[in-house]
Amino acid sequence: MKLRQIEIFHAVYLTGSVSAAARVLNISQPSVTKILHYAESSLGLTLFDRTRGRLVPTEDAHELFSEVAEIQKRVDLLQQASRNLRFGRGRTLRISVLPSLGLGAIPDAVSEFLAKHEGVSLELHTAHHDDMVRKLYERETDLVITYDVPATAPVAYKWLGKGEMVAVYRDGDIECDAARLPLSTFKGRRFITTVKSGPMGRLLSEELNRAGVVPQEVVSSQTYFVAVALVRSGVGVSVVDSFTAQAASAPGVLFKPLSPALGFNVHAIYLQNRPLSKLATVFLKHLKDAFEAYRLPL
């Protein structure tokens, strides 16, 4: 018997009629009748007696069904597995993100993604810049969400959005009516430095040096959300990325973009020899939308 004949026989045996089997399989009644006839002819057996409009299984059909049921079960499992592969169900997507990106946009994207993709699971890891390419090489992660794209590593990337570095300070600590805060404002102030926080920290350090501004560095933080927490506690002022500033905002804590503007891009990077899966591509669409929602109105 061919698989299609097995499927028809199985459906007719369970439903007891051609019309019911046709509805279950979403095919026409003549198709069911024709394929069932071929099955009986190829086997040389009568599988059903026609009695009062119903198909009653013969003894041969009962014997055959015990074998066919197991085959049909495996076919159903195969079809379900194929659907899972098509729609990403039953898959796990592993994503590494900078700590500064893990507070707002990414949780929002995860929520939207999981709401539309039942059966998918995500693994989220935080890592600093120096670890991210290594995680890709060692297959610890499928995607890395970061600011910069390594120039020498064999990686590909997708652009997700852009942000800015912003000043974070307590209400009343800095008086500035301008839309942007000059770097000169930090001269001599108690400052929570983030200059060791990857390329954005280095960019800030270069701009402060170019402007001849020497803040009074009282604390060094490698993570932006810790810097915001220190500002909230009155330790000093700081500069962090706009995503962290918006996600960690609290009453009495203000943030404002800088002059000159210190902008940056956000990318998803992955190995060139390991292209994005369909599941990863869909997730990045949600993430791109989330970053757009967090973008400062410039």
Image (cartoon, rainbow, N blue to C red):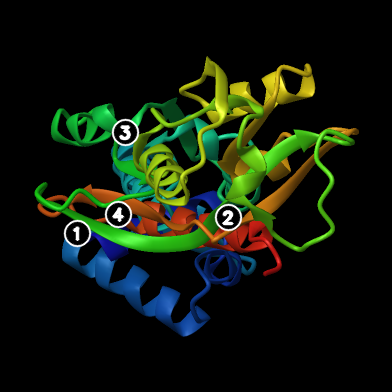
Question: Spatial distance from mark 1 to mark 3, Cα to Cα?
Answer: 66 Å
Q: In which quarter of the image is the N terminus?
A: bottom left
Question: Spatial distance from mark 1 to mark 4, Cα to Cα?
Answer: 44 Å
Would you say the residues marked 1 and 3 are in contact, meaning their CB atoms lie under 8 Å apart?
Answer: no
Question: Spatial distance from mark 2 to mark 4, Cα to Cα?
Answer: 40 Å
Give the amino acid type for the residue marked by disc 2 in the picture: Thr
Would you say the residues marked 1 and 4 are in contact, meaning their CB atoms lie under 8 Å apart?
Answer: no
The label number, if any, that marks residue 175 in the structure image: none
Question: Spatial distance from mark 4 to mark 3, Cα to Cα?
Answer: 23 Å
The label number, if any, that marks residue 129 in the structure image: 3
Number of other residues with Cα within 10 Å of mark 4, as a class: few under 14, some 14 to 19, many 20 or more? few
Name above or below for residue 298 compared with residue 115.
below
Q: Indicate which disc, 2 or 4, sits on the residue closer to the N terminus.
A: 2
Residue drawn at the location 37% of the way across and 41% of the way down:
73
Q: Indicate which disc, 1 or 4, sits on the residue closer to the N terminus.
A: 1
Give the amino acid type for the residue marked by disc 1 in the picture: Leu
Viewer-nearest residue: 255 or 20: 255
Residue 104 in view here: no
Question: Spatial distance from mark 2 to mark 1, Cα to Cα?
Answer: 21 Å
Q: Indicate which disc, 3 or 2, sits on the residue closer to the N terminus.
A: 2
Query: What residue would you read off at disc 1?
Result: 43
Query: What residue would you read off at disc 2?
Result: 15
Query: What residue would you read off at disc 4?
Result: 277
Q: Indicate which disc, 4 or 3, sits on the residue closer to the N terminus.
A: 3
Q: Which of marks 3 and 2 is in front?
A: 3
